[in-house]
Amino acid sequence: MRRGAIQFPMLLAALLPLTLLSILMAGIFLVITLDYNEHIDSRRERQLLQQLAAACESGLLSANADQLQGLAQNALTWVLAVSSARNCF
């Protein structure tokens, strides 16, 4: 019996579980990281909306249409930038 004939199956039996476990752990880490990033983004969006609501309230009470237009334009620019950044990944 050749010595090299048993080496490959033994090497495969030793390395295949390790390779599959590494791929599984990398996938789990990736899913957890993406979920965490979505959570952080939603928190930022809520904070921005709260700030925008407070600023719009002062604009509505003072009947300042220019201030409201500027706030709406800045918010739209920010939302477009965030959505385009999300589409890159």
Image (cartoon, rainbow, N blue to C red):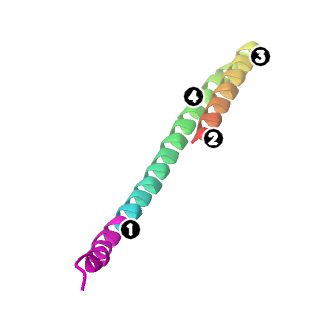
Which residue is labeled 3 in the image?
A: 65
Mark 2 or mark 4, whichever is nearer to me: 2
Name the mark nearer the viewer: 2 or 3: 2
Q: N-terminal of the two: label 2 or label 3?
A: 3
Q: Which residue is mark 4?
A: 51
Q: Which residue is mark 1?
A: 20
Which is in the foreground here, disc 3 or disc 1? 1
The C terminus sits in image quarter: top right
Residue 33: say if magenta.
Answer: no
Other residues around mark 1 within 10 Å, as few (<14) / some (14–19) / many (≥20): few
* N-term-proximal mark, 4 vs 1: 1
Does dot 3 land on a helix, a strand or a loop?
Answer: helix
Which residue is pictured at 48% across the width and 42% down the height?
40
- Inter-mark Cα distance, 4 to 3: 18 Å
**Residue carrying label 2:** 87
Main secondary structure found in the magenta portion: helix
Q: Of marks 2 and 4, which one's residue comes earlier in the chain?
A: 4
